[in-house]
Image (spheres, rainbow, N blue to C red):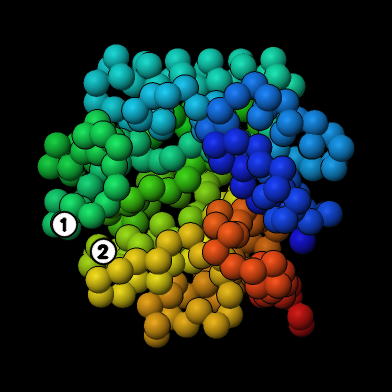
């Protein structure tokens, strides 16, 4: 379980830490911490328990409407502001001496939406968080993405972290072209995060998207997997469940075992961040979750 992480979002919660963390885990992914005391508690726990810190941008909650950096925006001022925000965060993290193993950003931002799909049920905090394919060309997408990859590569050398891009909603610019894979090979310092729940949710709402082929294609480039499950049926969606073997795909759950089989084949050393709500299950079930995932990721041959 040396590759496992838990999350601390919004605050450093000592009760959640005591319940969810296990000795030997890789560490904690932190995001949107409210106070200086939360950050100090995270840093102190990392020292006391000898774990690593991953950061899900932004580390600190600044009370802004859009938490993500819109580094692909077609508005030059908005794009410059996104890079400025990241730069300020990197400087702040350095001053705090958190020494993160990785820093994660949602990508693409803005999200490029497939014009053929009804996105009315996909959550966005603000209209600036997305653009439609008809308004955002593939050529501009290529250009802005390579600018991002080059900039993140440069910053990773200066600040000593792994830049990670977590897939948000995707369109065919990512899953029907080869350009992103070529960039990942050209700029190997930049890695990915694949979110099992987010990918499955898009598959259920976007008839043109399939999560299994995407997982097989991009798992080798992942630094971390955000692991959680959801049940999608007519009229309801259950979100952020810890993964358990009794959650069957034929009952509307994501095919977690198949995802993990692909991950074991393609990237056996990838980190696993349990981005679930552990309060939805008992302590016994939480332990079963950890053990089941560990067993699925172990090569028994």
**Quadrant location of residue 191?**
top right
Q: In the image, what residue occupies the spot 68% across and 63% down? A: 268
Q: Where is the C terminus found, in terms of image quarters?
A: bottom right
Q: Toward the viewer: 201 or 238?
A: 238
Q: Are marks 1 and 2 in contact (CB under 8 Å)?
A: yes
The reply to whether residue 86 is in sight is: yes
Q: Which mark is residue 215?
A: none
Labels 1 and 2: the sequence-earlier one = 1
**Quadrant location of residue 154?**
top right
Picture coordinates of residue 82, whole percent (x, y): 40, 22
Q: In the image, what residue occupies the spot 42% across and 48% down? A: 167
Picture coordinates of residue 14, whole percent (x, y): 72, 43
Picture coordinates of residue 174, whole percent (x, y): 34, 50
Query: Which residue is the extreme one toward the bottom?
Result: 250
Picture coordinates of residue 266, whole percent (x, y): 60, 65
Q: Residue 205 carries which label?
A: 2
Depicted 268 relative to depicted 135: above or below: below
Q: How crowded is mark 1: few (under 14 residues within 10 Å), some or many (20 or more)?
A: few
Rounded to the nearest angstrom, the CA distance separating label 1 from label 2 is: 8 Å
Q: How many labels does the image show?
A: 2
Q: How crowded is mark 2: few (under 14 residues within 10 Å), some or many (20 or more)?
A: some
Q: Residue 118 carries which label?
A: 1
Relative to 122, 250 lies left or right = right
Question: Which SS class for mark 2?
Answer: helix
Relative to 249, 301 lies left or right = right
Q: In the image, what residue occupies the spot 30% across and 57% down? A: 176
Question: Which SS class for mark 1?
Answer: loop
Q: In the image, what residue occupies the spot 26% across and 34% down? A: 126
């Amino acid at each position: 379980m040396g590759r496992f992480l838990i999350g601390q979002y919004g605050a450093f919660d000592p009760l959640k830490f005591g319940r969810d963390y296990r000795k030997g885990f890789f560490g904690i992914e932190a995001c949107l911490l409210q106070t200086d005391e939360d950050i100090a508690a995270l840093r102190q726990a990392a020292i006391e328990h000898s774990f690593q810190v991953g950061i899900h941008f932004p580390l600190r909650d600044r009370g802004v409407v859009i938490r993500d950096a819109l580094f692909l925006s077609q508005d030059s001022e908005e794009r410059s502001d996104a890079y400025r925000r990241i730069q300020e965060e990197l400087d702040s993290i350095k001053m705090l001496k958190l020494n993160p193993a990785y820093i994660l950003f949602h990508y693409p931002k803005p999200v490029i939406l497939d014009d053929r799909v009804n996105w009315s049920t996909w959550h966005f905090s603000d209209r600036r968080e997305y653009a439609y394919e008809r308004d955002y060309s593939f050529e501009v997408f290529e250009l802005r993405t390579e600018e991002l990859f080059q900039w993140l590569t440069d910053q990773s050398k200066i600040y000593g972290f792994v830049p990670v891009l977590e897939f948000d909603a995707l369109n065919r610019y990512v899953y029907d072209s080869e350009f992103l894979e070529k960039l990942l090979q050209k700029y190997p310092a930049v890695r990915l995060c694949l979110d099992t729940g987010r990918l499955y949710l898009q598959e259920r709402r976007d008839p043109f998207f399939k999560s299994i082929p995407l997982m097989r294609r991009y798992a080798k480039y992942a630094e971390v997997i955000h692991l959680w499950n959801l049940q999608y049926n007519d009229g309801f969606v259950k979100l952020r469940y810890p993964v358990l073997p009794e959650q069957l795909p034929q009952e509307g759950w994501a095919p977690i075992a198949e995802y993990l089989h692909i991950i074991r084949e393609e990237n056996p050393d990838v980190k696993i961040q349990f981005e679930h709500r552990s309060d939805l299950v008992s302590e016994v079930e939480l332990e079963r979750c950890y053990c089941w995932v560990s067993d699925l990721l172990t090569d028994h041959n």
